[in-house]
């Protein structure tokens, strides 16, 4: 994949992310705050963006979304590394609890 293809993929991901974020915010603001991991001010701004503004913002070469998981334990739980598939549900639940706690700490 060359640089132009990567930038095109980033732009597409940005637009998809903004559209998803706006949809989440409009359907359930509280869930959007948790799932997106952004501030209330950011949620207000994203909710108010026009389609033209979203296109302009998405057209940059910087990826707007990022991985929220920066903890090795959460990555291990999500990937179920070294565990059987039978424990997958428990591992995902544990990871969700850890991430929800971090969301509360950030808020």
Image (cartoon, helix red, strand yellow):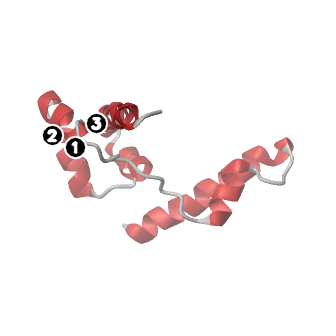
> Image check: 81 left or right of 31?
right
Q: Position of residue 45 (x, y in %)?
A: 18, 47
Instruction: Judge the density around disc 1: few (<14), some (14-19), many (≥20) Cα neighbours within 10 Å.
Output: some
Q: Quadrant of residue 2?
A: top left
Q: Are marks 3 and 2 in contact (CB under 8 Å)?
A: no
Dot 3 or dot 1: first in sequence order is: 3
> Of all residues shown, which one is farthest toward the front?
2
> Image check: 13 left or right of 59?
right
Dot 3 or dot 2: first in sequence order is: 3
Q: How many marks?
A: 3
Q: Which one is nearer the viewer's eye here, 88 or 60? A: 60
- Determine the secondary structure under disc 3: helix
Q: Please tell me which residue is depicted at 54% across the width and 63% down the height of the picture.
A: 70
Residue picked out by circle 1: 46
Answer whether residue 94 is visible to the viewer in this image.
Answer: no
How far, Cα to Cα, is label 3 from label 1? 6 Å
Q: Are marks 2 and 1 in contact (CB under 8 Å)?
A: yes
Quarter in which the C terminus is drawn: bottom left
> Image check: 56 left or right of 30?
left
Residue picked out by circle 2: 48
Q: Please tell me which residue is depicted at 20% across the width and 48% down the height of the picture.
A: 44
Answer whether residue 88 is visible to the viewer in this image.
Answer: yes
Q: Please tell me which residue is depicted at 20% across the width and 40% down the height of the picture.
A: 57
Q: Are marks 3 and 1 in contact (CB under 8 Å)?
A: yes
> Image check: 43 left or right of 105?
left
């Amino acid at each position: 994949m060359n640089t132009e293809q990567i930038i095109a993929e980033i732009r597409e991901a940005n637009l998809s992310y903004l559209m998803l974020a706006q949809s989440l915010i409009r359907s359930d603001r509280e869930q959007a705050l948790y799932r997106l991991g952004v501030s209330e001010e950011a949620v207000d701004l994203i909710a108010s963006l026009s389609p033209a503004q979203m296109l302009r913002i998405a057209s940059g070469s910087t990826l707007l979304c990022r991985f929220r998981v920066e903890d090795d334990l959460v990555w291990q739980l999500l990937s179920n590394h070294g565990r059987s598939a039978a424990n997958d549900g428990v591992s995902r639940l544990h990871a969700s609890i850890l991430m929800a706690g971090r969301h509360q700490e950030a808020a």
